[in-house]
Each structure stands twice: as C-alpha cells, then as structure tokens.
Image (cartoon, grey):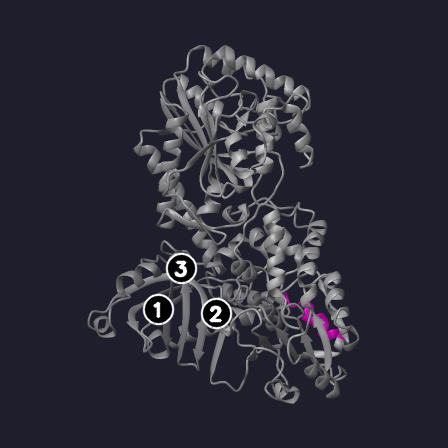
Amino acid sequence: MNASVPARRAFLFDMDGTIVDNMAFHTTSWLAFFERQGHVLDADAFFRDTAGRQGREIIVKYLGEDADHVALLAEKEVVYRELYGPHLATVAGFGQLIANARQNGVGLVVGTAAPDENIAFTLDGLNLRHRFDAIVGAADVERGKPHPDVFLKGAQLAGALPQHCIVFEDAPLGVEAARRAGMRVVVLTTTLPAEAFAAFDNVIAIVPDFSALDVDALFASVAPALAPHHQSSPTKNTMTTDIQEQAAAPDENKIIAERRVKLAALREQGIAFPNDFRPEHKAADLHAQYGSKTREELEAEPVTVVLAGRMMLKREAGKKAAFATLQDASGPKADGRIQIYATLDLTGEAAMAALHHYDLGDILGVTGTLFKTKTDELTIKVTQLRLITKSLRPLPDKFHGLADQETKYRQRYVDLIMNEETRRTFKARTAAISSIRRFMEKNEFMEVETPMLHTIPGGAAAKPFITHHNALDMQMFLRIAPELYLKRLVVGGFDRVFEINRNFRNEGVSIRHNPEFTMMEFYAAYTDYKWLMDFTEAVIRQAAIDAHGTATLTYGGRELDLAKPFHRLTIVEAINKYAPGYKPEQLNDADFIKEELKKFGVKPFATAGLGALQLTLFEETAEAQLWEPTYIIDYPVEVSPLARASDTVAGITERFELFMVGREIANGFSELNDAEDQSARFLAQVAAKDAGDEEAMFYDADYIRALEYGMPPAGGCGIGIDRLMMIITDSPNIRDVLLFPHLRRED
C-alpha cells in the first residue's frame, strides 16, 4: 500500500432514506408515475428491487431500453418534489453527528443515486451542501448501487482509503455497494427493519436515527484499520470462502489469471475436463427421500450416493476437514442443493489437498454416504471427490446474484447459476407449456409444424422481417403468424390442429414486446368463437395450476383469480364501464371520436371507420384497466380481416380478445370460410397498405385458392405464451420469461 496516501477517515452518507427520511415519498411518486404508464406495482417489492438504483435503471427495468428515460424521470421527480417538499427535514441527530465528525477531522461525503435536481432540492433546501467535502450523485458515476462506484469515488474525493470509511445506508443495495467497496456500514431503519440486513457481515451498527452515535466509538468498532473485504484474516482458525468474497475482489482479471494457472497444472496432470463421471442422484430427490430420516436411521442403513454439482460454498477447518455446498438445480423449484463433508481420513490426503485449491463455481463429482450433522442438515460424507469442470471466471456475490438487470439478460447462464427465482421462472414456463400440450392432445388436437419462412407475410397485422433466399433468388419474410397455414390444414381434413410456434415482428421492444416471441395457435372445425372462449379459458386455467399449483395468482402484489369465469364485454360496454361519461350518441359519432382521440395524441388513419375508431378509443381509455380476465367481443369487420362476420349484426365479427392485468393475452374468432368474402377483405387490406398502413395484410392468392376447395366452419385462437408466462410467474418484464431476450449490441 502506498504510504503517501493520507490516512484520513471519512463518513459517506447515502441521501434518500438516510440524511432524510423520504423513501415512502419516493416510492409513492414512483408508483403513481408507473400507474400513469399502465403498470400497477407492489410497493414493498418495488422498494426491495430498486432502492439505491439510479432512476435511469428503474425506467429501463420497467419500461424497456427504448423508453425516453430522461423525460420520464424528470416527470417522476417533479411528482416526488411536490409530495415531499412540505416535509423536508433531516433524520434526528444528523446535524450533531456531522458537527462532531468535522471536529474530529473526519471527511464528510454524500454518495447517492439521486439526480442533480433532487440533490439540490434536498441539500440546498436544508442548507447542507457547504458542510460536505464532496457530493457524488447519479450523474457522476456510470453504475448505480449495488456497484461500489459511488462510494469508491466518494472516498477518493475525500482523500480516504476505503478501509478508513464508514457508510451510512438504509437499503440492502447500498449496504452491498459498500461491501464491494471494502467499507463498513451503519444501517438506519428508516425504511426497512433490522432483519432485512441480517445476511450482511459488513454492518457494524443498526440504529433508528443518528442520535446515539459517537464518532470515536464507530471507528473504534472497526479498528484495527480495516482490510479490504476480499482479504481473509490470518488470525481465524476457520477460513470461509464464499461467493461474496470473490465478487469483492477489485481485479477480476487477476482471479481469472490465477484460475488459468490452476487449469494449466491440471492439464499437466492429465485430462483436465473428464467425461467419465456419471451421477446417479439429484440433490432435490435425496432431500425428498431422506430428509425426514433421523441420524440414527441413516447410520443404521447407510445410503451410498453419486452426485455432481457446482460448488457454491466452501468452508475449510484446517487441513483435516472441509464442508462445501453443491448445487444441481434439481427439483420442481430448481432449488436442488446439498452439503458435502470431506475429511482427511475418509476422503484421502490427495483429494483434500486438491479441494483446498478448488474454487467456487467449479463442478465436482462426489461419491459418499448420507448422514445428518449436529444441526440436522442432510450431508454427503465424501469417500471419493473429483473435479469435473474447472471454472475460470468468479461467480457474482451470493446476496443479490447478478444485481445489474441488463447483465442478467445478457449473461443468462450466470443468472441461472446464481438466482433461484430465475431458475424457478423457467421451470414454471416449461411446466405450463407441457400442460398446454397435454391439454390439447387430451382434446384430440394434433400438433403440427408449419413454415417459418413465408413468401407472403400473413395471418396478422404486423410489420415483418425481410430476408432473401439465395438459392431461389426471391424475397422471403420471417413468420408473423402461422394462421393461414394452419387453416390450410383444416381445409385438408385435419379438423383439430395446434402449433406452439415462434413468430417474428419487426416492431418496438418494450417490457411487453420482444421481436421474437412464442404463441400457441389452434383451430377446431365445427366450433365458433363462443366455444373458443370456453376452451381458451380452460387451457389457460389448467396451465396456471400445473405451473403454479393454483389458479389464484398474484401479479405485482395484486391478486388475479383465474378460477372464476372470465368476464365478457363488447368494446362499447368496456368504454362505458371503465371510462364512464361518454353518451351513446358520442360513441356512435366518428367525428366526435376523432376529436376525442386528439386528447390522447392519436391520429387515426384516414380510412378508419366507426368501428376502428371505437376500438382505438377503447385502447386509450379502458384496455389498461382490464385487470380481471376479460373477453372483449364482437370486433368490427374492418379490423378483423380473417374473422367471420356476424350473421345477426351488420359490421361486426365473431371475434374476441382476452385481456388480463391490462394487456392482451389471446385473440380468437369464428373463422371466415367464405372465399369471396375473404378475397374482398384482402383487397381492402391492400388498399389500407397503399394508404400508409405498414401492418396491413398482403393479398394471399394461394390461401384464397385453398378456401375455394371448401373449409368447414371453424374457430381459431392464438395465445401469447410469453405474456401468459409473465402473469403466471409474476414477472414485470417480458425479458424475465425469455431465456435469451433481444438486446442492443454490447458494444
């Protein structure tokens, strides 16, 4: 360490929730802001996920990368300042503490995720700015908490080493940022109870306010001078190595280099990546079968197991014994983990020496017998231990897994290793899709596969991706929907067909939209849209039960009961229910609706008729409020080019869309099987495309030819699998239910 660096001590204060007790106002303003954007969020869950993060990160998390985060954040902060302004005050004892600190030569720094406007609002409003040596805000660092950037920069500006700094925080993400910076923390319980910080080992005090704190006592509690957190103490008899310690290392490249040296040594010894180990057991199965056994029962009838897993924790007690935790992500909840116990006399000197050099993230193979520890934990007493795969990169910390949301999406493989909730989400997705397949087969549907490269993009109103077939020298389109091919099969005599398919639409990216997405489309001859609604309701309900265990879900902290019959409303009925105040004659006046839509910034196409205008008004006024499962029925003909027209009411079709939690989940209708009517509607779509509607359909002559052979009356529906999975798994962003979502290039 360079002796020329001043040995100065410093206090680093978070601002929101620490200097001022304002987090309830921040949360209230965020929730109000997101509600305006059509998102209803749970307050507690929102705070846990976002406290300490920069506003830009929060906007991206919930509204997507393409959102105008600068303008949106400014809008939110105006709401916050209006709410909190009359209550602006420091937490009790703060003024006295910083006065005493200054008297003792302690540097004072603010390290906050707040934007400059809020820093000015708080510090200038309280006349505090001049009392700090430095102020580091969101604009001064690239990454927010839990990254350590804000505290490391603050320490640098204060002229203090990280181990000579004490951080004051109110949020777990902030405590984690301090831990990564190698700093100790005083926690204020202004926002969360003390239990929320039980997992952190860098907390030296937990207090309700600053009143009882003494400057000298605080620094005495961390004396002698703190070593950086990633260094182990040589005075401890028992050395604990775990993920948090490796994540705190300041130079990941150094760790990788050290591990490459270990790999090189393995290569010299023989096969570095063996492929002859065959595990016979899974952790979750062992817990299920033997977890209830007593120590005496396991000793009386020894159970030999052979298991492989990734080492997530290692505790060495000298050279004679060691515990480790292996993870294999087994079981329906993807939480399969089991402890192993290696000893010098049973495992062997060579294996123990090797284990000492193994790193977290390494994949091990073990053979041994089951027993229970004194704390009654099911454990494998190891007789044989092997390294199966050497991990070259260190794993992230154990408290938050991957804290950066974008990194979670880009490096899903690491997210799956670290985050049990992520693994559980995708286990649930698989369970739901399997349930859908079983349900369809039980109801005599045949699963089929149709082309993903189309010569004409059809089956939906959407903008396609365009490609070129070199061998045929022709333009082709990635599938936007499989509908027209599936209906060709109904013409051919397959009365009930379904396809779980990937579709591609060259449109916007948001928390609800991904350019590549999964749907389940199905078609049944001799049915209509009323039958379809009953069937769709049943298949979705069963998928929720099989994936979640019950049809009663919670989304964003609010209950969603799929066990109840789904509601059914027409477009006008929905407007009247959720946006009361319009008179019947107004909703039947095209000119009135056009003027009304201007209030929402919507300019309809010149060709839009009354039905299309009513639909647009519904989308602006009622759609986001459809929390409970609701079918919107009887869509106008002009926006339903493939649906059968009503036989009793002119101008509407036998079509529905299913909405839950304010978003569309499914779309279905009685199929149009009149070839001449279908031809006329295709021509109308072509006219709309010529008028500027990029999403209008092409004329598909081959599909018309198929209909001319005769298609039986039928019903068809498409269910958005990704959006359904968001609801079943309580995921706020569509990327949370896609293993590898589309993102901008890393560079």
Identify the residue under disc 3.
335
Q: Along the horizontal axis of the image, is 497 left or right of 731?
A: left
Depth check: 369 or 715 in front? 715
Residue 154 is inside the magenta segment = yes
Please, what is the three-letter code of the amino acid marked with disc 2? Tyr
Identify the residue under disc 2.
358
What secondary structure characterizes most of the magenta part?
helix
Provide the residue span drawn in magenta: 146-157
Residue 165, percent across and down?
67, 79
Residue 343, percent across and down?
36, 77
Residue at 56% across / 79% down in the picture? 207
In the depicted structure, whether residue 586 falls above or below residue 647: below
Image mark count: 3
Q: Kindly identify which numbered label has been placed on residue 384.
A: 1
Residue at 69% across / 53% down in the picture? 73
Please, what is the three-letter code of the amino acid marked with disc 3? Asp
**CA distance separating discs 3 and 1:** 24 Å
Number of the front mark, 2 or 3: 3
Residue furthest left in the image: 300
Residue at 72% across / 51% down in the picture? 70
Task: Work out whether mark 3 precedes mark 1 in sequence or the reverse, and give the earlier one.
Answer: 3
